[in-house]
Image (cartoon, rainbow, N blue to C red):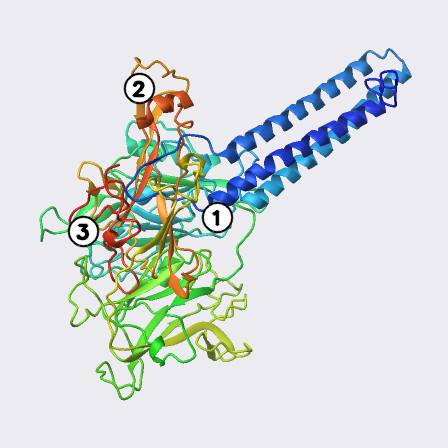
Amino acid sequence: MLGRYGYRNRPKVGSWLHIRNASRTLVLVAFVLLVLFLPEIVSAQLTTGDVGLDFATATGLATTDIRVFVGRVINAFFALLGFIAVLLYVYAGYLWMTSTGDAAKVDQAKKVITNTTIGLVIMIMAYSITAFIIQALTGHSIVPGVGDGDSRRDRGDMPIGDRTYELGNGIIEYHYPEVGQVDVPRNTNISITFKRPLVLSTVFRNYDDAGTYGTEDDTVGGVAVPEVLQLNTDNFKIIAVADLGGTDGASPDERFSTRYPDSGALVDPPPTVRVTAVRVVFDPLEGQTITISPALPIGSPTTDIAYRVALKGGDNGIKVWWPGVTEGAELVQKNAFSSMNADGGYYWPFTTGTMLDLTPPHITWVEPTPVIDPGRPENVAARNQLLQIYFNEAVDPTTVSGIIGEGGGFTNIEVRARCLPDTDCDFNDGVDFTSVSGKIFIGNRYRTAEFVPSEPCDGVTENTCGNQVFCLPRNVEIRVRALAATLSSEPPKASRPDGVLDMVGNSFDGNGNGTAEGPESAERRTDFNRNSPPAALAGINDTARWTYHVGERIDLVPPTIMDIDPKSPPPIDRAHPEGPSKVPTDLPITVLWDKTMSVMSMRTGAYDEDENAFSDDRTTISLRSKELAKESLDQDCSDPDVACPYVSLDPPYFFIDLGEGPEEIGGIKRTRMMITHRIFFTANDMGYTMEETASWPERLPVYQPVIGAQIQDTLQNCFFPSVGWNCDMGDNNSCCNRVGQEDYFCPL
């Protein structure tokens, strides 16, 4: 029988019905791909959660992420459909060219072109819808070259072997914009935090530091140091990637200058730069941050522009202060980056979008939490409690960190106290608020400011890891004010840094209404009170204030770890039952603490494999790694008698992310700490086949976070890994420091 779609009634090739069916086929294939693969992608996303690694056992990554594989399959099928469309165009052209005046063949060719175009448009729409749905559900794109949706950073495109490992492992604690960050506002500033105080003559133009660490002798042309200085553009290069030069030159310095020509870099006018203050007495645990402000917005209002920031290393580059080799020796200047090449001692890319950021920052959380009645016994804070202020976005570090009271002049955030009536208090007369001396640090991707008082606790000489504990005055009312900055003629931009600013220079939105309205004025005389927020904001300015009470109690309970994600076997990781090869390689390592944790104490650094300890006394968090790659991806290592050569890669960069504030779990505020890192590599990335990984498991990439005992909670109590999660696991345990800070044993 010959029905409607039987042999005799089959549409001829090139006919409208044939082309319509071909278009339907293209759409049908696209739909089938979506139905088949989307559940697998969503399942992979929903079952993995935030990736993490156990503290003392090794985890290898053996296979490619399932989402990467599915994306490749979808892209391959759509590429095939595109190839079919090209063949149809070629066929239409053939019909037209061979028509020899036959009007029917010409019409047939036109129909093929028209209907193929319609089918191609439908196919492109299907692909776009598929990509959009997958991006929305999983946060990861199947479009080649598009970022993974994680804080708008495209870390997966970073080349293997660049110098980004200095971030976390080296001298750099953090910087903004982040490595590979995309859609950066054009009016952005650039901030970099170094783990040691800077030799300022290597940072500023025409700056004379008189060869001393302290600032009392610093001069510029013999006069006092101004608030804002010009950047030393010989050592700091900000340049569009399209303007990069070659690598010619007889010396590393010459090659650096050739690579970053002044014709393309931000040199004239030079960017301005501000720097955070450091204590007069050198503290090896104290770093320093600079904020670089380009004279004009960078990028383009019509297209994205890729930029690179490069820092010069070597003897003629950036230097930091370092303690002498022997105890009590004078401070010495040391190269910030031990090596130097054409690309600099350290460099990283970011990409600007087309927009300016006109949204002011606001507070998301403060610790201790402001309450209506701070005097109730359950609301009174311990004396060793640190103050924390969380913001919704990165803020300019130079406007939220500094020395308060004795030894400093930082005023953008005020911490003042007065004695509570009828209590044992000798701080002041209890009438006027008096400044509490201390220092405000910045951390958590420039989103958290933390105040540490400078007065040692009486009766408690040191905490369990041997560090001094500092206390607020006893029996006082603390008043905190976070100041809004003076507005320019174009709000929300500030005219000067006399208040809290975000990374583009917008003034602080203290009352949280989404608009920068500036500090106290004749029209707005009242600060925004976070203890009892007003129902209406008429007459309220953008300086936020709040109070809390401090009693006599000192809390000495140490923090512990509630959970690590994922856990290394044993035991079986219920969150990732299929093993570590199914864990996405680009998500943060997650550690959940049972208390709120101190930002100041989270200091990244490298791990010395020879000494089996942190390589620097200041370090509390390391990310150990073993990445061994073939010398070339096409090497055949299947023969067990062949010694396949390999190279050891630079360790992944990493930094700490605490979100927008502690999480309330079980009625208690707890910190969820994430170690954000460069994408981890799988054995496939290293060039190994599944057969080779089975033959040489020691070649698998292995990653291991190490958390030291000197990390502290907001009460300055030290973490003891011996009372952390799952410490009864025998040889495979999560306790790399069982007996305190003196004895580390963490076999990788």
Q: Give the labeled residue for mark 1.
A: 151
Q: Give the labeled residue for mark 2.
A: 645
Q: Give the labeled residue for mark 3.
A: 741
Q: With 334 as the anchor, is 27 left or right in this view? A: right
Q: Secondary structure at mark 2?
A: loop
Which quarter of the rendered picture does the N terminus lie within?
A: top right
Could you classify mark 2 by the number of other residues whose Cα lies within 10 Å: few (under 14), some (14-19), or many (20 or more)? few
Q: Tell me if residue 8 comes above or below residue 623 in the rendering.
A: above
Q: Are marks 2 and 1 in contact (CB under 8 Å)?
A: no
**Real-space Cα separation, disc 2 to disc 3, in angstroms:** 38 Å
Location of residue 258 in the rendering, given as x and y in whole percent from the top left corner: 37, 32
Identify which amino acid the numbered label 2 is placed on. Answer: Pro
Location of residue 166 in the rendering, given as x and y in whole percent from the top left corner: 31, 41
Which comes sooner in the sequence, label 1 or label 3? 1
Q: Tell me if residue 333 comes above or below residue 104 in the rendering.
A: below
**Real-space Cα separation, disc 1 to disc 3, in angstroms:** 35 Å
Which quarter of the rendered picture does the C terminus lie within?
A: top left
Identify which amino acid the numbered label 1 is placed on. Answer: Ser
Q: With 713 as the anchor, is 280 left or right in this view? A: left
Name the mark nearer the viewer: 1 or 3: 3
Q: Secondary structure at mark 1?
A: loop
Could you classify mark 3 by the number of other residues whose Cα lies within 10 Å: few (under 14), some (14-19), or many (20 or more)? some
Q: Secondary structure at mark 3?
A: loop
Residue 578 image-quadrant placement: top left
Could you classify mark 1 by the number of other residues whose Cα lies within 10 Å: few (under 14), some (14-19), or many (20 or more)? few
